[in-house]
Image (spheres, helix red, strand yellow):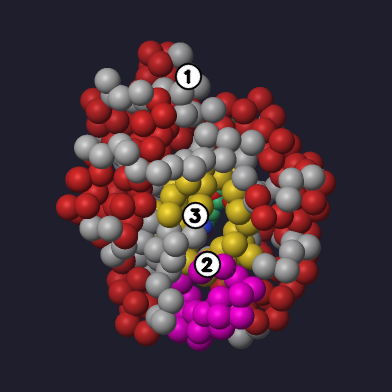
Amino acid sequence: MMNRSNFLKSTASMAGILAFGGISKASEMINNNAQEFVSINEVPLITLNNGKVIPQLGFGTWTLTEKPEQHVREAIEVGFRLIDTAQGYQNEAGVGKGIKDSGIARKDIFLTTKIGPDVMRNRTVKQSIDTSMEKLQTDYLDLMLIHWPVKEHIQETWGIMEDYVNKGLIKSIGLSNFNPDHIDDLLKYAKIKPVINQIEIHPTFSNMENAGRTLYRGIPVQCWSPLAAGKDLDDPVLMELAKKYNKSVAQIILRWDIQRGLLTVTRSTNVEHMKEDFNIFDFELSAVDMSIINGINRNERTYEKNDPDSFPW
Ligand SMILES: NC(=O)c1ccc[n+]([C@@H]2O[C@H](COP(=O)([O-])OP(=O)(O)OC[C@H]3O[C@@H](n4cnc5c(N)ncnc54)[C@H](OP(=O)(O)O)[C@@H]3O)[C@@H](O)[C@H]2O)c1
């Protein structure tokens, strides 16, 4: 029986190895728990393909336009150290204030934001990055993502993002809502390889093909709307599993993400929920129960228009 500390090590190492070390190395890791491991507040740290580390679990801020500073500060107080925002969420200033108000040093927070589709089409990417940093009250970003694959403008946008990495103003750059063919196009010209792809993944939309193919290209996958924005929380199968493990449905879903070597960002405005969502490292779902959750998939996006090939925004 693997003890808890070794289990944490192996989960984190697996995700990193799967992401950029190849399949055979990933298999080797399953039997090798001696790897060095450093964790912040028990959340495993995944090593990205540029050597930087990212917490496997983070706090998302989509829709948090009312008092974002309060929710972000509370999430940090609960223990979250990865904060995910976007230019399009219109809350970067509040997110920046929440981080400041928390009293936790900037270097101990992993801050992600995203370049919006309009900004790419309007060709104001550079200005928008400067504005994001100003609003977030920071002189560097840990991670900047292309929010949606606006095909005609990806190459130009990526080049500007690479310039910011070269200047040391952005530490890592990555993708969101990219399908494998979008990734393959980008890899033809990218000088810097994307460090993650953040995509929609939850039990009713497990998105297995995209996740697997993204990982195979050496890019870790981060789940967005892991709880289907709340819609998967009353699934009867998940409710039964929650009872079995004496955990909440949210905890079961987030644990399912973590055990598959994926990163995940979840959102809440309720401190008790934040605590639940953060406390998912003291139990393990059995292999069979993981398969049962895989079986819930109905290929149902939270919103049908969220298709990376035809989104209307
Ligand atoms: N890249 C993209 O295109 C994209 C798109 C969507 C989202 N995202 C990112 O992904 C993050 C997460 O997705 P999401 O915002 O859709 O959130 P989510 O984590 O899928 O679901 C949030 C909902 O679940 C509820 N909830 C959370 N924890 C709970 C718990 N323990 N018990 C009961 N209810 C709970 C919340 O309600 P309460 O507030 O009442 O707790 C809220 O209604 C976003 O915030 C954003 O950062 C990215």
The quarter of the rendered structure image containing the C terminus is bottom right
Q: Is residue 238 above or below residue 209?
A: above
Q: Amino acid at mark 1?
A: Lys
Q: Amino acid at mark 3?
A: Val
Are the residues tagged 1 and 2 within 8 Å (C-beta)?
Answer: no
- State the SS at label 3: strand
The residue lying at 48 percent from left, 66 percent from top is 174
Q: Which residues are magenta?
A: 148-173
Going from N to C along the chain, the mark reached first, 2 or 3, is 3
- State the SS at label 1: loop
Q: Quadrant of residue 96?
A: bottom right
Q: Which mark is residue 172?
A: 2
The residue lying at 49 percent from left, 60 percent from top is 52
Residue neighbourhood size for the residue with mark 1, other residues' Cα within 10 Å, grouped as few (<14), some (14–19), many (≥20): some
Q: Which mark is residue 53?
A: 3
The residue lying at 70 percent from left, 81 percent from top is 127
The quarter of the rendered structure image containing the N terminus is top left
Residue neighbourhood size for the residue with mark 3, other residues' Cα within 10 Å, grouped as few (<14), some (14–19), many (≥20): some
The residue lying at 43 percent from left, 54 percent from top is 47
Going from N to C along the chain, the mark reached first, 1 or 3, is 3
Report x, y in % for residue 31. Answer: 22, 37
Report x, y in % for residue 207. Answer: 33, 50
Q: Is residue 141 above or below residue 301?
A: below
What residue did someone put label 1 on? 247
Residue neighbourhood size for the residue with mark 2, other residues' Cα within 10 Å, grouped as few (<14), some (14–19), many (≥20): many
